[in-house]
Amino acid sequence: NYPKNKKNQGTAAPAAEPAPPTRTINADCIKGSDDLGNYYNTQAELAQHQAINRDEWYATNKDWWLQNGGGGYGGSTDEEAMVGDGGGEEDGVEGLAFLDRLIL
């Protein structure tokens, strides 16, 4: 119930917020290869590969970061251990193109 306006003896309901656009995720169009050259025909295929190998990968990663007292690449801080920081802008453009293909 809205208060009556003296001028027109009624008040319109407030305008509803427009609904956000609906986006459809089309995972079937996502395909490609990983850094080891393994090719995945779908996102589901990649997810299955990750699920199968998860525990082994986590154990290997943990061992690698503990080498030489920690730091992975021999660095003692995150900054010292970072590698491949060049090309960040290109990575960003590629990542946005990937999301554009995933989210229609």
Image (cartoon, rainbow, N blue to C red):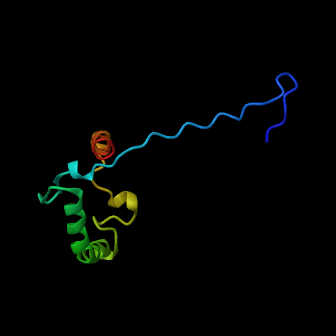
Judge whether 47 appears above or below 16 on screen.
Answer: below
Judge whether 59 appears above or below 72 on screen.
Answer: below
Residue occupying the point 23% across, 57% down: 43
**Placement of the N terminus among the 4 image quadrants:** top right
**Placement of the C terminus among the 4 image quadrants:** top left
Give whichever of 73, 94 is nearer the camera. 94
On the image, the x and y values in percent for residue 12 come to 73, 31
In the picture as drawn, the residue positioned furthest to the front comes out as: 9
On the image, the x and y values in percent for residue 23 come to 39, 44
How many numbered marks does the figure carry? 0
- Res 33 → quadrant: bottom left
Give whichever of 70, 51 is nearer the camera. 51
Give whichever of 3, 50 is nearer the camera. 3
- Res 71 → quadrant: bottom left
- Res 4 → quadrant: top right
On the image, the x and y values in percent for residue 74 come to 29, 66
Judge whether 12 appears above or below 79 on screen.
Answer: above
- In the displayed structure image, the side of residue 73 where residue 22 appears, left or right: right
In the picture as drawn, the residue positioned furthest to the top comes out as: 7
Residue occupying the point 18% across, 51% down: 31
Residue occupying the point 19% across, 56% down: 42
- In the displayed structure image, the side of residue 47 where residue 71 appears, left or right: right
- In the displayed structure image, the side of residue 33 where residue 96 appears, left or right: right
On the image, the x and y values in percent for residue 20 come to 49, 40
Residue occupying the point 22% across, 74% down: 52
Judge whether 10 appears above or below 75 on screen.
Answer: above
